[in-house]
Amino acid sequence: MAVTLKDVAERAGVSTSAVSRTFTDGASVSAKTRAKVEKAADALGYSPNALASSLTTGRTKLIGLISNNFHNPLFLEVFDRFTRGLQDRGLRPLLVNLSDETDPVHSVRMMRQYSVDGAIIASSTLPPSFAEAYRDAGIPVVHSFGRYTTAPQVHVVGIDNVACGRMAGETLIARGYRRVAFLGGPEGATSTQDRALGFLGALHEHPEIEVSVSYASAYSFDAGRVEMTKRLMADPAQAYFCGDDVLSVGALSAVQEAGLNCPRDIGIIGLNDMQMAGWQNINLTTIRQPVAQIIGASIDLVIGTVEDPTRHPETRLFPCKVIERGTLRPLG
């Protein structure tokens, strides 16, 4: 038989309400009573029922973690850090895989059915309106890896993708490439649009450099490989900003299969600095996105908004930097 709250109360010699208060965050209970209850609970092996506690506190401690890109290896790190970060704060993640969904109606309904305290949208491709639907449903929400704006309607934590695109363009310019290209993810993705905008903006200042643009069907290895194979069958550029590490790895595979060498024949720079980018057989030059800082700030913001739903939406951006490895020609 499971140990009950009443069993603990009898062993500790206190009322059941005193036991309940001991295991309710913020409830008033004396240090002496708390010590007696905790000693009795330890002896009996009692753990409070989280679902029952939620009926008392009105909080489930559930935080919805919603994403639409489970195929990208970067998100293994993202989910690992998010789940551990939430659990370390006494919260429980409820993971939702959107797959190909772009309409928030179904996931919003699910979050309300489970009475989540808040939600984190972890996606660089979904538009701002997706997270705003959660806000409109009364769910405290943070859009992690979301699109930068100076007037956010919900909390946004991430990077300035336009600035990263410019950084990639300037990196290729500094290495003397004269035919460069942007090979992005899905054309409709906000991150793709912003990275392309920054990249083309940097190249616009150098009319002597030839620039081309193409888009892969997804942020995936296969999509990057297919799109680069198409580019190689035509007149390939000297260097590509692939807009994402997993696209870059797919593109690198296509280059190698064509019997070409990277960086001698074609240079590649990615974005994210996922773990495998540093593997010896990949050795990808890329732009590092500070994932740990983004996730930490996202958790802080969602907790703060649960505590104060009237909190004004804010944008928190973190700087990126180029990580030099072996897929671009060296400077000079």
Image (cartoon, rainbow, N blue to C red):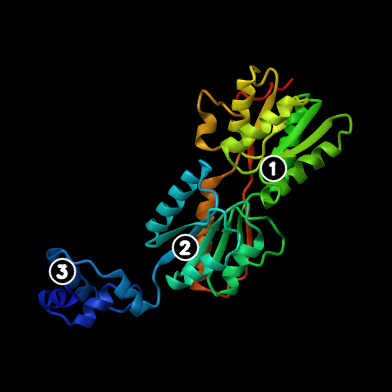
User: SS for tag 3?
Assistant: loop
Sort mark 2 into few (<14), some (14-19) or many (20+) by Cα contacts within 10 Å: many
> Percent from the top left, x then y, of residue 263?
66, 21
* Mark closer to the chain start, 1 or 3: 3
* Mark closer to the chain start, 1 or 2: 2
Q: Is residue 126 left or right of residue 87?
A: right
| Nearer mark to the viewer, of 1 and 2 | 2
Q: Is residue 243 something one can see in this rendering?
A: yes
Alpha carbons under labels 2 and 3: distance apart: 29 Å
> Percent from the top left, x then y, of residue 311?
58, 72
* Foreground of the two, 216 or 323: 216
Answer yes or no: do the residues labelled 2 and 3 have beta carbons within 8 Å? Answer: no
* Disc 3: which residue: 2
* Foreground of the two, 126 or 79: 126
* Residue depicted at 58% across the width and 65% down the height: 104
Which residue occupies the extreme right position in the image? 207
**Quarter holding the N terminus?**
bottom left
* Disc 2: which residue: 64
User: SS for tag 2?
Assistant: strand
* Disc 1: which residue: 164
Q: Is residue 287 something one can see in this rendering?
A: no
